[in-house]
Amino acid sequence: MSPTKARVRGRWVGIVLAMIGIGVCLSALLGFITMLWNNNLPAHDGANVRDYYIVVGRSYSQGFTVGFFLCLFLTLAAVTVRDQVLSFRRRRAAALRLSSSGRPS
């Protein structure tokens, strides 16, 4: 396999992985937001305030983690798509130069 085909295949793998990751993160984020919206925080057994804040902190840390990975996968998708678009533009410009001059530049 040529290096160009390997790069293109790698870009498509990156895009697919990013889309899968974005889908998983969005579904987890939707679950977190729904939990907050419906006020369905996990029940805490203790009657004191400290235990309540520990439960709330764990819930928000899960939301933070999901948000972090959502940003990570969005960045992966953006960088991969940008690389693909720049490669396409370079190939198109090279083809236009070749067709206008009749020889490669």
Image: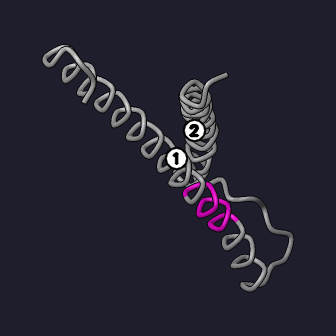
What is the x, y in percent for residue 59? 68, 63
**Outermost left residue:** 100
**Residue type of the residue flagged with mark 2:** Ala
The quarter in which the N terminus is drawn is top right
What label does residue 76 carry, if any?
1
Q: Where is residue 2 in the image (x, y as percent from the top left)?
A: 61, 25
Q: Position of residue 80 (x, y in %)?
A: 48, 40
Left or right, residue 98 beside residue 29: left
Residue at position x 61%, y 54% from top? Answer: 66
Q: Where is the C terminus found, in terms of image quarters?
A: top left
- Front residue of 28/48: it is 28
The answer to whether residue 29 is left or right of residue 94 is right
Label 2–label 1 contact, CB within 8 A: yes
Towards the viewer: 94 or 31: 94
Q: Which one is earlier in the sequence, the residue at label 2 or at label 1?
A: 2
Residue drawn at x 67%, y 70% is 56
Residue underneath mark 2: 18
| Element type where label 2 sits in the image | helix
Secondary structure at numbered mark 1:
helix
What residue range appears in magenta? 59-67
